[in-house]
Image (spheres, grey):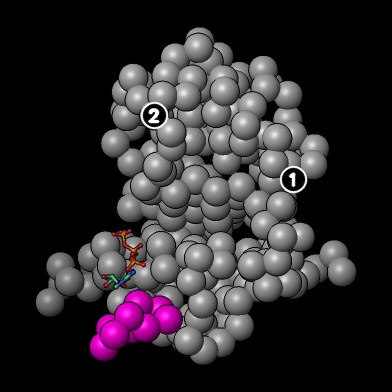
């Protein structure tokens, strides 16, 4: 089925106590596209990713990866993940981390290729804990892509990076898309969505309030500014 989405939430709801973190959300990632999830803190972006990763179960609705339950190993093998908080063994060297992670996947990328892609070729012998925040983010990206994922999850991948480092990572993400990889990315930066996304989904308080192209979102934001200015 060529047209089947690689990831799908349909009416997905997730509650934490009294709070509804995700409220009947519909969302699909089509094969080969980059979908950006935008929205303020607490909007439900990380919760949505958590459901698709099988880290939490939906209280209601459907959650699918490649048409399967996200907890199935056959689905998990086909994804790459870069989360906001990555706990990695601090004493391992970058090269060791990469080799270990790649060994979980059936057809890993060559280590040199992964390192070049993430711009960490000169860091392979360094212990992970000794790296700067930006360098650690690049290593996390390398770990996420070393298994040649069909679908990549990037949760605020460039937060805290300077503009040059961000643009380098954007170039690497574009390379993956060119290879046919699909991406679900969360970000607080509209310009990141503009640089990368085929479509954007804007969330707030657990709901999707806009879904479409970045241009359409820009137009909506501009229109609202004009309306506010004229009242
Ligand atoms: P951010 O941009 O800060 O990462 P987000 O859009 O990813 O925000 P979520 O982390 O999905 O938002 O959080 C949505 C809501 O659900 C928040 O109000 C949050 O407090 C709540 N929440 C998320 N995870 C849990 C949890 N494990 N226990 C309790 N509440 C949670």
User: Which image quadrant shows ligand 1?
Assistant: bottom left
Q: In this view, does 128 lie to the left or right of 144?
A: left
Q: Is residue 37 above or below residue 81?
A: below
Q: Which residue is drawn at 64% across and 68% down?
A: 70
- Tell whether label 2 touches label 1 (CB within 8 Å): no
Q: Is residue 99 left or right of residue 128?
A: right
Q: Nearer the viewer, mark 1 or mark 2?
A: 2
Q: In which quarter of the image is the C terminus?
A: bottom left
Q: In this view, does 160 lie above or below 204?
A: above
Q: What's the magenta bit mostly, secondary-structure-wise?
A: strand
Disc number for residue 172:
none
Q: In which quarter of the image is the N terminus?
A: bottom right
The residue wearing badge 2 is 90
Q: Residue at x 51, y 77 (%)?
A: 57
Is residue 168 something one can see in this rendering?
no
Label 1 packing within 10 angstroms: few (<14), some (14-19), many (20+) = some
Answer with the quarter of the image where residue 73 lies. bottom right
Q: Is residue 193 left or right of residue 178?
A: left
Magenta range: 14-22
Task: Decide which of 157, 80 is in the foreground and name it.
Answer: 80
Say which element carries label 1.
loop
The residue wearing badge 1 is 180
Tag 2 or tag 1, which sits nearer the N-term?
Answer: 2
Q: Where is residue 208 in the image (x, y as percent from the top left)?
A: 43, 76
């Amino acid at each position: 089925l060529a047209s089947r989405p690689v990831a799908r939430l349909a009416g997905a709801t997730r509650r934490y106590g009294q709070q509804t973190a995700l409220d009947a959300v519909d969302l699909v990632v089509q094969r080969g596209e980059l979908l950006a999830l935008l929205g303020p803190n607490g909007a439900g972006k990380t919760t949505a990713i958590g459901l698709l990763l099988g880290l939490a179960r939906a209280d209601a609705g459907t959650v699918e990866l490649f048409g399967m339950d996200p907890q199935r190993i056959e689905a998990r093998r086909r994804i790459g993940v870069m989360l906001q908080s990555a706990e990695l063994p601090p004493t391992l060297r970058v090269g060791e981390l990469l080799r270990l992670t790649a060994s979980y996947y059936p057809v890993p990328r060559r280590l040199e290729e992964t390192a070049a892609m993430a711009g960490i070729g000169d860091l392979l012998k360094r212990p992970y804990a000794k790296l700067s925040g930006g360098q650690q983010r690049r290593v996390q990206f390398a770990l996420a892509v070393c298994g040649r994922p069909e679908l990549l999850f990037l949760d605020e991948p460039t937060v805290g990076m300077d503009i040059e480092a961000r643009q380098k990572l954007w170039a690497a993400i574009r390379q993956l898309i060119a290879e046919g990889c699909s991406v679900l990315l969360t970000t607080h930066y509209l310009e990141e969505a503009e640089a990368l996304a085929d479509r954007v989904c804007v969330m707030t308080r657990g709901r999707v309030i806009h879904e479409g192209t970045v241009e359409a979102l820009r137009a909506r934001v501009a229109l609202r500014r004009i309306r506010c200015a004229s009242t």
